Image (cartoon, rainbow, N blue to C red):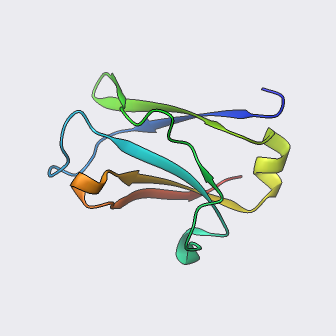
Amino acid sequence: MGSETQIRIAVSGVPDSTSLPARLYTYLYAGGCGALSGKPAYSMNDTVRSDLHGPGMELVKVAPLPLDNLRSGNYALVVRSSAADGNQDLFCAKVI
């Protein structure tokens, strides 16, 4: 999308203790999942409510950088629960 990249994340479930509808926060951190820096490089949280699709959910987020920069920037994508649900990191993956 030019200077932005749309990211779609399929979520098969959340912990049973998560309030529904789930409020999931999404971030890009510089570096890898094993050593996340204190502050995310990008917060993609204009919307945090998830859309139900069959048994799971789909998150559609926009990263404020072009796809080539996202892929070459050594970023980790993190999906986190809301503060009410403990701010738990539910998912982390290296962006490739």
How far across and how far down the image is residue 44, in percent? 56, 43
For the N terminus, the quadrant is: top right
How far across and how far down the image is residue 21, in percent? 23, 33
Question: Residue extending furthest bottom?
Answer: 35
Residue drawn where x is 50% and y is 59% of the image: 92
Residue drawn where x is 45% and y is 35% of the image: 10
Question: Residue extending furthest left?
Answer: 17
Q: Quadrant of residue 13?
A: top left
Q: As displayed, is residue 47 above or below residue 84?
A: above
Left or right relative to 18: residue 30: right
Q: Quadrant of residue 75?
A: bottom right
Q: Quadrant of residue 23?
A: top left
47 or 20: nearer the viewer: 47
Question: Number of callouts in the render?
Answer: 0
Left or right relative to 77: residue 12: left
Residue drawn where x is 31% and y is 51% of the image: 82
How far across and how far down the image is residue 4, in percent? 75, 34
How far across and how far down the image is residue 29, in percent? 62, 62
25 or 71: nearer the viewer: 25
Residue drawn where x is 32% and y is 32% of the image: 56
Q: As displayed, is residue 28 above or below residue 24?
A: below
